[in-house]
Amino acid sequence: MSSARYLKVAARAAGRVEDAVAKATRPARNVGFPYRAPTVPGGVEVPEEPSELGADYDTRWARSPVAKVARAVIVAGPMKALVDGLAAPDIFGHDRLDDLVRTAGDDGPAPVIFTPNHHSHLDTALMVRAVPDVWRPKLFTAAAADYFFDKRWKARLSALSLNAVPIDREATGRKSADQMATLLQRGWSLVIYPEGGRSPDGWGHSFKGGAAYLANRVGVPVVPVHIDGTDTVFPKGAKRLKPGRTRVTFGRPIRPHEGESTRRLNERIERAVAELADEASTDYWSARRRAAAGTTPSLTGPAYTGWRRQWALADRRKRGVAAWRKPPQRRWPDLG
């Protein structure tokens, strides 16, 4: 068959297929409102539909009785297996919360705000696993709206498995703060990262005042928490998980003082987490002595840049008990 004849046959076949498709879909084209969007007259400006994702995602369904039961199954099953398999956490400091547990009523203990440092997306699942059992049934987490709630499937998964509430990191507004304050007033406890985001280099960020503001506003205690090791299991920017060891250390509750400003309370929270980091990398007695002398190492690391900062981080990790599968390897800087 010549090429010209072949093209004619192919064109004729394509036309027949097109006619068949048009005939089959003709009934659907004739279906109107409400099965299809209504037509809009020319010159009429249609307002945009309100967003249902990001900071506007409604998570109330995730605190229904059915969702709470499903979350308990997820936490006790797949989440526990995932965290234990990847992070092998050692958990310390539950005894420092005994006074809060002893005052628990029929509805459980009083709400608190847990304020861990933040190095990895694994941190939230690790915190849900590490928090004492008495707080776990009524625990919610603050999550970045632009990451965990940017797609519908991620929003539903985050809300169901972590009871996450979206926080808009790009804009300063009262909507998220009001929602979290309301939940705290209703007896729910909160996990929030005062740093506002994951560490890019293994050192911490300075704390923002969100947790301190909520504690002052609602009058609930803050429980400082230090997480060690997730920055080597699944650091920011990593594509693969590297199973290792982690350590979660809970500190003594911090209660807002009468008339205390958010800034001063935030400084106390950051200092308490830094003391727990010192304890995790050395020992309790040495950390307490440095805390009393005011010489606790900062969470944000030394005021160096480049390779010297990484060198100091390797020293800190070498002293710690978490995450190291082999001794850290130092590299001399390339001086040209």
Image (cartoon, helix red, strand yellow):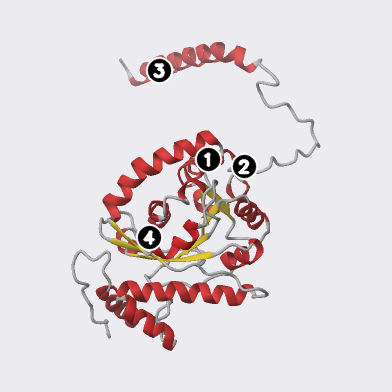
Kind of residue sitting beneath label 1: Arg
Kind of residue sitting beneath label 4: Gly
Foreground mark, 3 or 4? 4
Q: In 3D space, how far apart are the residues under numbered discs 4 and 1 (Cα atoms)?
A: 23 Å
Q: Earlier in the sequence, mark 4 or mark 1?
A: 1
For mark 3, give the secondary structure. helix
Q: Which residue is mark 1?
A: 152
Q: Is there a contact, CB below 8 Å, between mark 2 and mark 3?
A: no
Q: Which residue is mark 4?
A: 237
Q: Give the x, y percent position of residue 150.
A: 53, 47
For mark 4, give the secondary structure. loop
Q: In 3D space, how far apart are the residues under numbered discs 2 and 3 (Cα atoms)?
A: 47 Å
Q: Is residue 85 left or right of residue 195?
A: left
Residue 59 visible to an observer of this rendering:
yes
Q: Is residue 26 left or right of residue 39?
A: left
Indicate which disc residue 10 carries. Answer: 3
Foreground mark, 2 or 4? 2
Please tell me which residue lies in front, 267 or 293: 293
Image: 198 above or below 15: below
Residue 294 quadrant: bottom left
Q: Earlier in the sequence, mark 3 or mark 1?
A: 3
Foreground mark, 2 or 3? 2
Q: Which residue is mark 2?
A: 52
For disc 3, the neighbor class at 10 Å (few under 14, some 14 to 19, many from 20) is: few
Q: Give the x, y percent position of residue 66.
A: 51, 33
For disc 4, the neighbor class at 10 Å (few under 14, some 14 to 19, many from 20) is: few
Q: Earlier in the sequence, mark 2 or mark 3?
A: 3
Q: Earlier in the sequence, mark 1 or mark 2?
A: 2
Q: Earlier in the sequence, mark 2 or mark 4?
A: 2
Kind of residue sitting beneath label 3: Ala
Instruction: Please tell me which residue is depicted at 53% across the width and 76% down the height of the picture.
Output: 268
Q: Give the x, y percent position of residue 6.
A: 36, 17
